[in-house]
Amino acid sequence: MFTGIIETLGTVTELRKEGGNLHISIESTITNELKIDQSIAHNGVCLTVVAIEGAIYTVTAIEETLLKTNLAKLEVGNRVNLERAMILGARLDGHIVQGHVDQIGTCTKVDQKDGSWIFSFTYDAEKGNPTIEKGSITIDGTSLTVVDSGKYSFSVAIIPYTYEHTRFNTYKEGTTVNLEFDVIGKYVAKLMAAR
């Protein structure tokens, strides 16, 4: 379980294919606090630490994960949003995030406003995932509030702190992102569809 509040950015140092799996090595300022078997969200994808060496740790993404997320597009030198699992009893500053990406989306527009940014995204309608205005959405692991909700599109407003401390400062038109829709909204939508 995660909150969608990004702790830090990590840098991909090595990518190694093994069968359908991808071993991803990441240099991070939190590596010295990690342990083997720990769950960490990488651009919103929950992966398990399998090795640690100095300031670098390694996680493995299986084929299923690579097919459903943007992790297959990673390159050495890319930055990734990182968040460790929440501590039970701590504040839930974002919203309930499972680290299970529902689908990918595409950035369609970036508008710079006076001191902030509006990012617009589209996503595949066939998955049936809902967004609602003022509801929660997770983009590459970042907990955000939906500003405008359209039919299979939405936008979010980004403050300078989030822009500077996450991958948002690298997004442009055509950037692929991982989307995790609000878990409560998904349950409500499923219950309504069953009626």
Image (spheres, rainbow, N blue to C red):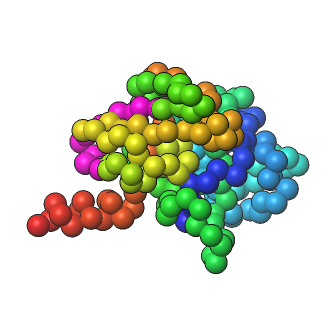
Q: Tell me, yes or no, if residue 30 can be seen here.
A: yes
Tell me, yes or no, whether the highlighted magenta stretch contains residue 151. Answer: no
| Residue 92 picture quarter | bottom right
Q: Quick check: 13 above or below 45?
A: above
Displayed quadrant of residue 37: bottom right
Between 173 and 82, the one lying in front of the other is 173
Q: Is residue 54 left or right of residue 160?
A: right
Q: Looking at the image, which is closer to me, 142 or 135?
A: 135
Against 192, residue 7 (above or below) is: above
Query: Could one spot residue 74 in this view of the protein?
Result: no
Say how many tags the image has: 0
Q: Residue furthest top?
A: 173
* Residue 1: % across, % down: 55, 65
The reply to whether the magenta stretch includes residue 123 is yes
Q: Position of residue 77 (x, y in %)?
A: 72, 29
Q: Name which residue lies at 41% across and 46% down.
A: 146
Residue at (48% x, 24% y) in the render: 111
Answer with left or right where residue 51 lies relative to residue 182: right
Rendered location of residue 47, percent (x, y) = 60, 54
Establish if 13 lies above or below 132: above
- Check the image and name the residue furthest to the right: 54
Q: Residue furthest left?
A: 195
For the point 44% across and 29% down, the residue is: 107
Left or right: residue 187 compared with residue 121: left
Name the residue rendered at 73%, 41% in the picture: 10
Residue segment shown in magenta: 119-130
Q: Position of residue 142 (x, y in %)?
A: 55, 48
Which residue occupies the foreground of this view, 145 or 68? 145
